[in-house]
Image (spheres, helix red, strand yellow):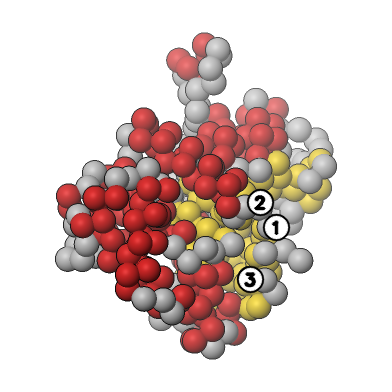
Amino acid sequence: MSLLEVKNLRVTYGSGARAVPAVRGVDLRVTAGQKLGIAGESGCGKSTLALALLRLLPATARLSGEILIDGEDVLTMKWGRLRAVRWAGASIVFQGAMHSLNAVHRIGDQIAEPILLHQKTTPAVARQRARELLEQVGLPVARADAYPHELSGGQRQRVMIAMALACDPRLIVADEPTTALDVMIQAQILRLIEQLVAVQDISLLMISHDLTVLAETCDRLAVMYAGRIVEEGPARTVYGAAEHPYGRALSATFPRIGDTASRRAPRGLPGDPPDPSALPSGCTFHPRCPVALAACAEEDQALVTAGEGHLAACVRVGAGTEGLR
């Protein structure tokens, strides 16, 4: 059984004529110990998907489909069961640690809080566990008495990771965990996440706009565009030999070591992802696609096999996408 299985998930904000589809029929699966990355530009629905997994979306969001964690549907769970699953079954590392931590509480108390709530232990034991977690993520124990504003951005992100690990979850959802960090700190945080996932045998769902980060960190990679998964497969395959033109375009924006041409002239795509409230007909990527066919404007494409363990939603799958090579 999969640890996490998402079936035909749809998330819509608002209702009636003002309904805005943010996630449109997403299917995902994460097995025990697996690391799955989700990539895409801002506005493609990645964070909405992450928050939906633990029902953290605002009341204006309408959800349908299934989100199964250990076979239990998050969307139909009663409130008490959902609270237990949120920390002990699955936890989340939010982007922007400064906005996720409480500015008026000490770091140690914030890490200890979910331990007290979910493990029914004493304050002394919870505080000791908080100190152990700080050491585990590479912070001095003395930082337990600090307030968030007394820590650097990288240190705050480590605190968020410690909080996510507090109740020994089997799945961690990391939503842009290295946003706004410099490249040195970003590398340290990514290595830390990899080590913790490996040592504790935790499954990881990591969201980022950076394909290079996901290709280095994850086993599998899913590319998301306009609320849908348009490609999924082994991380190195999707990064290095994507079958969908959008996956190729994302990969081409990063210069390759040793490739002088890509270093001097990294490629990208003009324009932005479509407004969810005014999606184009057919394949939603066709207005920006350099290899689109006439049929692409008329009919959307479902995911089809593009190789072993590799899926892509493009009419050109199997016929090549030379226009982006």
- Disc on res. 69: 3
Query: For the residue marked with disc 3, what is the amino acid?
Result: Ile
- Label 1 SS: loop
Cα distance between the residues tagged 3 and 1: 10 Å
Front position in the image: 168 or 47: 168
Q: Report which quarter residue 24 is drawn in.
A: bottom right
Horizontal side of residue 17 vs 216, given as left or right: left
Q: Residue at x 58, y 47 (%)?
A: 199
Q: Position of residue 101 (x, y in %)?
A: 28, 61
Front position in the image: 304 or 129: 129
Q: Which residue is mark 2?
A: 34
Q: What crowding class fits label 1: few (fewer than 14 Cα within 10 Å), some (14-19), or many (20 or more)?
A: some
- Label 2 SS: loop
Query: For the residue marked with disc 2, what is the amino acid?
Result: Gln
Which part of the image, by quadrant, shows the N terminus? bottom right
Cα distance between the residues tagged 1 and 2: 5 Å
Q: Position of residue 235 (x, y in %)?
A: 65, 39
Horizontal side of residue 160 vs 300, given as left or right: left
**Pointer 2 with pointer 3, Cβ within 8 A:** no
| On screen, residue 159 above or below 193 | below
**Pointer 1 with pointer 2, Cβ within 8 A:** yes
